[in-house]
Amino acid sequence: MGKTIIIIGAGIAGLSAGCYGQMNGYHTQIFEMHDKPGGLCTAWKRRGYTFDGCIHSIGGLNPRYKLYHYWNELVSMEKLKFFYFDELARIENSDGNTVRVFTDPDKLEQELISIAPEDGRFINSFITAVKKLPSRDMQLDKPLELWNPLDYYLSQFRTAPIIKDLFRWRKSVADTAKKCKSPLLKYLLNSEFFSHFPTYFLIFSLGHLHNMNAGYPIGGSLAFSGLLEKRYLDLGGQIHYNAKVAKVNVRNNRAIGITLESGETHGENGIVVSAADGHYTVFELLGGRYVNKKIRKLYDDHPIWPSAVIVYLGVSRTFEKEPPVIELSLKKALVVDKRSRLDRIPVTIYNFDPTLAPEGKTCIRVILQPADYQYWHHLRNSDRQKYKQDKDRIANEVIRLLEQHLGNMEDNIEVTDVVTPATFERYTNNWQGSIQGWEWLPRLIPESMRKELPGLRNFYMVGQWVEPGGGVPTAFISGRNLIQIICKRDKKKFATKLPAKY
Ligand SMILES: Cc1cc2nc3c(=O)[nH]c(=O)nc-3n(C[C@H](O)[C@H](O)[C@H](O)COP(=O)(O)OP(=O)(O)OC[C@H]3O[C@@H](n4cnc5c(N)ncnc54)[C@H](O)[C@@H]3O)c2cc1C
C-alpha cells in the first residue's frame, strides 16, 4: 500500500476522493462527523416515509456523455433506475394562470407560445438553444490544473461551435426575462430557483433532462450515497463515523494529519484532504492562517446558495394527476422568518418514486428559500420552544395552503417534519446552512477555484466549496479530479477500475 490520504467528510466529494484514492493504490481513511455517509445528499425515515434531503435530478445518466462513464467507475449505472421528467413543473401565477414546463423542447415551445405569442421570436431562439447546446459534451477529460498549452489550444475547437450561443445566453435568467413582453413568461423566468443563474445553465438543464442525461435516481439521495459508500468500503477504504475533525495539524507549513474533537490524532505521514465545509476548513481547522486577499474576498463577498426551511409531509393519499413539482403563487406572502417572505412556493410531490412511501401514500417536500440563517441559528440556540413553535407555524401554514390548492390534504397528513438552516448546519456543518456552496455567477466562462491554500503543503480541498455551483455530480468529479492531480504529482498513471461490479 502506498501513501496515506486522510479525508475529512464522507459527503459525495469525500467518498469520491476515497474511492479513486483506493483505486490508485493509496491507503485512505475518511473521518465523518455524522453517523451516515452522503453529507447533504441524504434522506431520513419518519414512520414509514422516507424524506429526501437532496436530489431532484443529477446529470450523467446517458452513455453518450463522459460523465456517465465516470459514474460507472463507481456505481453500475445500468442497474440503477432513474425517473426522467416529462412535465418538470407546473407554475401558477396569482391570476390563476398556469404554465407547464415540459422537458421536451417542442412541447415546451408550444406551451410557451400559447401563453406568450408576443414573445415568439425570443421563445424560438431559446428553444433552438435548448436543442443545440446540451447536445455537446462539455465535461472535461481532466482537471484544469493538469491542462497543458495543447489542452487549452484544443479546447477552442470544442467550444467554438457554441461560443456565440454561450455569449448570447450568459446573462442571468432574470436579466434575460427583461426582454420578454408577456407578464406570465416573465413570471416563469423569475422563479427563485434559477433566476440569478446564467441563462445557459437553464438551457443546459432543460436539454439534459430531455435527452435523458439528467433525472432522479429511484430510491432517493441516501440510497445513492450508500452505493458510493459501499464501493469505497469494498475497495478497502475505512470510514470513521461520529468523528468530527477539530484541527488540521501543521508543521513548517506542511499538513501533518488531523486532530479529532476527542483529541485523537491521525495520519501524521499522510496527505490531508478536506471534503468538508470550506469556511470551517479555512478558518477553523486551519485557524485562518493560509488565506490571501482573494480567499478573504471570496468568503466576504461571493454569493452563496442560501439556506432553506423545508417542510416535509407524509400524506396518506396519492396524487396521480399532479406533476412532480407545482409552484404555487400565494395571495398573501408566507412569512418564513424576519427576512424572508415568499409569494411563490415550489411543492415537490414524490409520486414519481414509490419506494419513498408505503403503498397508497405520498411524500411531499416544500422548499422555502431563501431562509435567514442568522435567525434560525440564533433561535435554536436561545429559545428551543419558540424554535419549535416557529417550525410548527410554518408547517401548518404550508398544509393550509396545500389544502386550498390541492384539496383533501389536512385529514390525510400522517407525518410532518421541518428542517431549518440550523438543521443543515448541525448535520453537515455547511457555512450559514448553505445547501449547495457558492452560487454560479452569470459569466461566459464559469469560475474556477484552487484546491490548495497559499503557503500550505500536503493539503487539498474538494467538494462544493471549491467548485462554484456545487451539486452532486460536481462534488463527485471534484474528488475524482483531485486524485488525478495527486497521481500526477506522484508520477503515477491515474487508474480506474471499469466497470463497477454492482
Ligand atoms: C434540498 C437540497 C436539494 C438539492 N438538490 C440537488 C439536486 O437536485 N442535484 C444536485 O446535483 N445537487 C443538489 N443539491 C446539492 C448537493 O447536495 C451538494 O452540492 C453536494 O451533495 C455537496 O457535496 P459535498 O461532498 O461537496 O459536501 P457535503 O455534502 O456538505 O459533505 C461534507 C461532509 O463533511 C462532513 N463534515 C463537515 N465538517 C466536518 C468535520 N469537521 N469533521 C468531519 N466531517 C465533517 C459533513 O458532515 C458532510 O458529510 C441539493 C442540496 C439540498 C440541500
Image (cartoon, grey):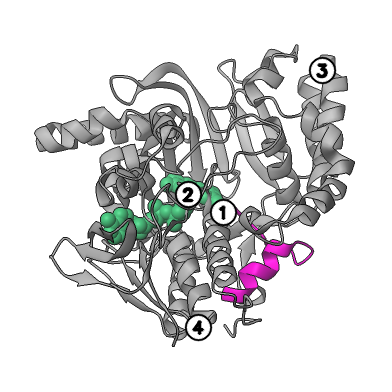
Mark 3 crowdedness (10 Å alpha carbons): few <14, some 14-19, many ≥20: some
**Residue 393 visible in this rendered orientation of the protein:** no
Residue topped by disc 2: 464
Labels 3, 2: front one: 2
- Residue carrying label 4: 25
Disc 1 + disc 2, Cβ < 8 Å: yes
Q: Identify the element where label 1 is drawn.
A: helix
> Real-space Cα distance between discs 4 and 2?
25 Å
- 273, 388: nearer the viewer: 273
Can you tell which of label 4 and label 2 is closer to the viewer? 4
Sequence-wise first label, 3 or 2? 3
Residue drawn at x 59%, y 75% is 491
**Nearer-the-camera pick, 37 or 350:** 37
| CA distance separating discs 1 and 4 | 24 Å
Q: Amino acid at mark 3?
A: Asp
- Residue 120, percent from left and from top: 86, 21
Q: Position of residue 67 (x, y in %)?
A: 68, 62
Residue at point 32%, 74% (across, down): 269
Helix, strand or loop at disc 2? loop
Ligand 1 is within 8 Å of the C-beta of the residue at disc 2: yes
Contact, CB < 8 Å: mark 4 with mark 2? no
The mark closer to the camera, 3 or 1, is 1
Mark 3 element type: helix
Q: Earlier in the sequence, mark 3 or mark 1?
A: 3
User: Label 3, label 2: how many angstroms apart (C-alpha)?
Assistant: 37 Å
